[in-house]
Image (tube, helix red, strand yellow):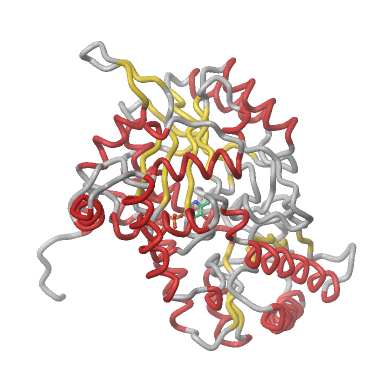
């Protein structure tokens, strides 16, 4: 055996956890089969990228610092090029964006600008995990980045059923009771009320209000993650976010600019306006405590990257709805194309079923056979189409008879090609006798 210096067993147990291997696995499969049509990646459509815009956005933000905030040329340079404020330099623009697009009123001081939404998740979970009795509840299926971040801070994740309304409130109540009866402390419940990844399911306004009421009566924090809310498929109307409805500071809100501006900037944020009493008797927003953690991980989010995002916001009066007219139309068109394409290829009432999300990037297809990583490899190799096994979004390792299709990084023609190939795979699999479905179909 090759000589080694360390074993994985001697490292933090998260590094050998399936949740942390999941993203790498999915990226590697895609790299292995570059010619396959990818209905796997939840990435923005690359034809929308324009590197010339970076310079325009930087200039816009520089002008904003000088003209609107009155900074001298030296101060402008320092703001962009020097180490900077831990909580960020575009917090005021994010607050404006939340007011304009989401009707969320928030003190900019309650915002921490982060290295992607992923860092925001980590900061919140790190802060909430105070002791070994703490657990996190999360609607299952759950974004694997959330599960992975929880692993890094040794915070167990307990699933809550989703259902057609986005969260099964009776199950949430039952999970809370069960955890507390076991002497555990549920610190928060992670939810994605708008076009969830991976399920595509949304919560209607009444369900959101019921969830907020339950959070208040059960003294529970909600972590609302909203990277896809800007992309409804059926018209411009959007449902208010939990944070917009939150009058009791129950909601920690996570935002990402990856889908609405560009993922390469790696800028996201957290709104954490919960009042925290310090050991010195002072009271301030939870954001201040998160900033302390951030100062020991990334020090501050790249001001250059923040300036690009800030310039993009300023270019559209801080409205991402206005900035994404083309993107919103394209993703909505693709989602409809995907759902119509599924209906054309798989007969109604047959063994293949799928949900019809009201927006976002994802559709879940349920089939009467196990969908695992081996099948994904075979799909890519023999049929030339990539998708994501839903098992990656459950935390129990059980087989799942469903796959996630993404509409964001492809053209309608590629959707057709991918679906033709998927249909060929499914036809061949249906000819092989297999075990019955393990999980119910998504709503
Ligand atoms: C639900 C969800 N949350 C967070 C993120 C991560 O966002 P960011 O790229 O800003 O870290 C993603 C990315 O796909 C996501 O799907």
Q: How many marks?
A: 0
Q: Position of residue 176 (x, y in %)?
A: 55, 24
For the N terminus, the image quarter is bottom left
Nearer to us in this view, 333 or 23? 333
Q: Residue at x 74, y 64 (%)?
A: 368
Image quarter of residue 303: bottom left
Vertical placement of residue 175 versus 281, above or below: below
Vertical placement of residue 306 versus 226, above or below: below
**Would you say 59 lies left or right of 159 here?**
left
**Would you say 214 lies left or right of 288 here?**
right
Image quarter of residue 172: top right
Q: Residue at x 60, y 82 (%)?
A: 37
Q: Residue at x 57, y 70 (%)?
A: 40
Q: Position of residue 56 (x, y in %)?
A: 41, 68
Q: Position of residue 207 (x, y in %)?
A: 72, 32
**Would you say 274 lies left or right of 167 here?**
left
Nearer to us in this view, 63 or 24? 63
Q: Residue at x 32, y 16 (%)?
A: 283
Q: Position of residue 133 (x, y in %)?
A: 36, 25
Nearer to us in this view, 352 or 411? 411
- Which residue reaches farthest top? 281
């Amino acid at each position: 055996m090759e000589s080694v210096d360390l074993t994985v067993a001697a490292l933090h147990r998260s590094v050998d956890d399936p949740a942390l291997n999941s993203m790498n696995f999915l990226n590697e499969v895609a790299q292995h089969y570059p010619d396959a049509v990818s209905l796997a990646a939840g990435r923005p459509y690359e034809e929308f990228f324009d590197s010339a815009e970076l310079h325009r956005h930087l200039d816009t933000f520089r002008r904003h610092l000088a003209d609107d905030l009155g900074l001298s040329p030296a101060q402008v340079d320092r703001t962009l090029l020097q180490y900077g404020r831990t909580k960020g330099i575009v917090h005021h623009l994010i607050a404006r964006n939340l007011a304009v697009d989401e009707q969320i009123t928030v003190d900019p001081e309650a915002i921490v600008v982060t290295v992607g939404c992923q860092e925001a998740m980590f900061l919140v979970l790190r802060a909430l995990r105070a002791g070994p009795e703490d657990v996190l509840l999360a609607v299952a299926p759950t974004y694997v980045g959330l599960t992975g971040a929880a692993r890094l801070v040794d915070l167990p994740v307990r699933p809550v059923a989703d259902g057609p309304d986005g969260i099964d409130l009776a199950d949430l109540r039952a999970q809370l009771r069960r955890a507390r009866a076991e002497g555990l402390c549920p610190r928060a419940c992670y939810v994605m009320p708008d076009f969830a990844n991976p399920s595509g399911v949304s919560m209607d306004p009444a369900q959101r209000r019921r969830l907020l009421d339950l959070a208040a009566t059960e003294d529970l924090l909600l972590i609302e993650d909203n990277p896809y809310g800007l992309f409804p498929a059926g018209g411009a109307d959007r449902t208010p976010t939990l944070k917009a409805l939150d009058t009791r500071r129950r909601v920690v809100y996570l935002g990402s600019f990856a889908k609405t501006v560009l993922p390469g900037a790696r800028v996201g944020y957290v709104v954490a306006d919960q009042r925290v009493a310090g050991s010195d008797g002072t009271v301030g927003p939870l954001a201040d405590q998160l900033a302390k953690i951030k100062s020991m991980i990334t020090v501050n989010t790249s001001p250059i990257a923040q300036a690009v995002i800030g310039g993009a916001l300023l270019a559209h009066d801080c409205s991402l709805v206005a900035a994404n007219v083309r993107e919103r139309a394209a993703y909505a068109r693709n989602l409809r194309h995907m759902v119509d394409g599924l209906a054309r290829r798989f007969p109604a009432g047959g063994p293949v079923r799928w949900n019809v999300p009201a927006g976002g990037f994802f559709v879940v297809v349920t089939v009467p056979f196990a969908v695992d990583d081996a099948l994904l490899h075979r799909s890519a190799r023999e049929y030339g189409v990539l998708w994501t096994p839903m098992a990656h979004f459950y935390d129990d390792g059980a087989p799942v008879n469903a796959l996630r299709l993404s509409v964001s990084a492809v053209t309608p023609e590629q959707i057709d090609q991918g679906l033709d190939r998927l249909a060929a795979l499914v036809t061949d699999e249906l000819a092989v006798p297999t075990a019955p479905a393990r999980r119910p179909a998504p709503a």
